[in-house]
Amino acid sequence: MSASAIREILKITQQPDIISFAGGLPAPELFPVEDVRRATDNVLTKYGPAALQYSTTEGHPPLRQWIGSRAGIPAANVQIVTGSQQALDLLGKILISEGDTVLVEAPTYLGALQSFQPYGPNYVQMPTDDGGIDLDALEKILKTTPAKLLYAVPNFQNPTGRTLNAERRRRLVELTGQYGVLVIEDDPYGQLRFTGEAAPSLYELGLEYAGDVDSSHIIYCSSFSKTLVPGLRDAWVQAAAPIISKLVQAKQGADLHTPTLNQMIVTELLDDVLPRQIETVKKAYGERAGIMLGHIKQQFPGGVEYTTPEGGMFLWVTLPQGLDSTQMLVRALTRNVAYVPGSPFFALGGGENTLRLSYSSATPEQIETGIKALGETIREAMD
Ligand code: PMP
């Protein structure tokens, strides 16, 4: 494990005069504080001390039931976890032996690399484009490299904001099925689509491919962090029974169970607050993404490319070859604007000319000022 130099630089971005597109936090002003207060009260009245007692490792039964019925699978195939970040760590623990080949998108979610790293994977990067993973490239890799695991964020990926298109999803499920590769589908943002048509999840396609829930080679992770609130740390995994039973063992060693009270609070909010909250968040992020893209179009010089996300919290900028976004960050900070340089999101390096922008928690004024400052920074770096 190694501390990241960029994390140190980004500490500066917490100063109040800096407009930060770096953090990637859900918008706090949208959190349903009063609903959580009411739900907490209801839970304590309804369950009393049981809400504060140890509980089962698998999770609060009504919460597992709700997730299972929405996915059309038995509750037994649902494991509650303490944030989907814990799912990634536990899946690394039970699935990755030192030297196992793990296929990751280039770029991929940095937190997954951090979770898997201690278990000693041998990463192979899958090239990506605007439609997500390049499936021809993946097929070539699979023909020559025996891989254990493939990790992907198919919806509004962190960091790029890109989505894996429907046709590629089918082919990915078939190819990994044929080659015996397990797939971790990490989907914290799927519910936050603000434009375009949803594609079926790899998990749904995996059920069709396998024909039954306990033979599926797709492991699905999602979370209430981006749809409801991140601080309750409630998330889940959907997987075949043999995977769930290993996860239960691994989780017992990690934290015994996800906090009982938090699971009960989330359960209390599922039917009325969650759907309303998803609509509120989608609308806000859709507006913020639109505003950011509008200013980017006006302010960024020619030769700079960027993604147009259909949901989620991020977009991805590619500067002309030869520019280094890590070096440029120092100049950006002098203009009071921050972003995350792209290279740490590449398991095997590369992407020095890329960067991630988050629009989820910025006001329209901050977006306007910040993108203008970033445009000037890029222009200066290009001169
Ligand atoms: N996966 C991805 C792709 C993410 O972006 C995040 C949050 N940054 C997580 C997992 C972890 O989310 P949580 O632990 O809050 O569920």
Image (spheres, rainbow, N blue to C red):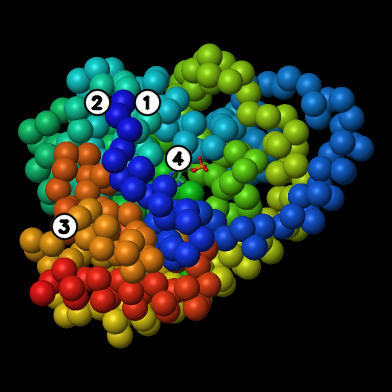
Number of marks drawn: 4
Residue picked out by circle 3: 324
Residue 128: image quadrant is: bottom left
x and y percent of residue 250 in the render? 49, 17
Decide which of 138, 348 is in the foreground and name it: 348
Residue 144 vs residue 109: left or right? left
Residue picked out by circle 4: 220
Identify the residue at horizontal 38%, vertical 66% (top origin).
Answer: 336
Decide: marks 2, 4 in contact (CB < 8 A)? no
Tell which circle, 2 or 4, labels the residue nearer the N-terminal end.
2
Q: Distance between the residues labelled 2 and 4?
A: 20 Å
Decide which of 249, 136 is in the foreground and name it: 249
Decide: marks 1, 2 in contact (CB < 8 A)? yes
Q: How far apart are marks 1 and 2 (CA)?
A: 9 Å
Q: What residue type is labelled 3?
A: Asp
Using the rendered image of the protein, determine whether residue 75 is visible from the camera's viewpoint: yes
Quadrant in the picture for the N terminus: top left
Identify the residue at horizontal 10%, vertical 36% (top origin).
Answer: 143
Q: Distance between the residues labelled 1 and 4?
A: 14 Å
Residue 105 vertical position relative to residue 301 in the rendered view, above or below:
above
Closest to the camera, between mark 1 and mark 4, is 1
Tell which circle, 1 or 2, labels the residue nearer the N-terminal end.
1
Q: What residue type is labelled 1?
A: Gly
Residue picked out by circle 1: 92
Q: How far apart are marks 3 and 4 (CA)?
A: 35 Å
Secondary structure beneath dot 3 equals loop
Residue picked out by circle 2: 121
Q: Distance between the residues labelled 3 and 1?
A: 32 Å
Decide: marks 2, 3 in contact (CB < 8 A)? no
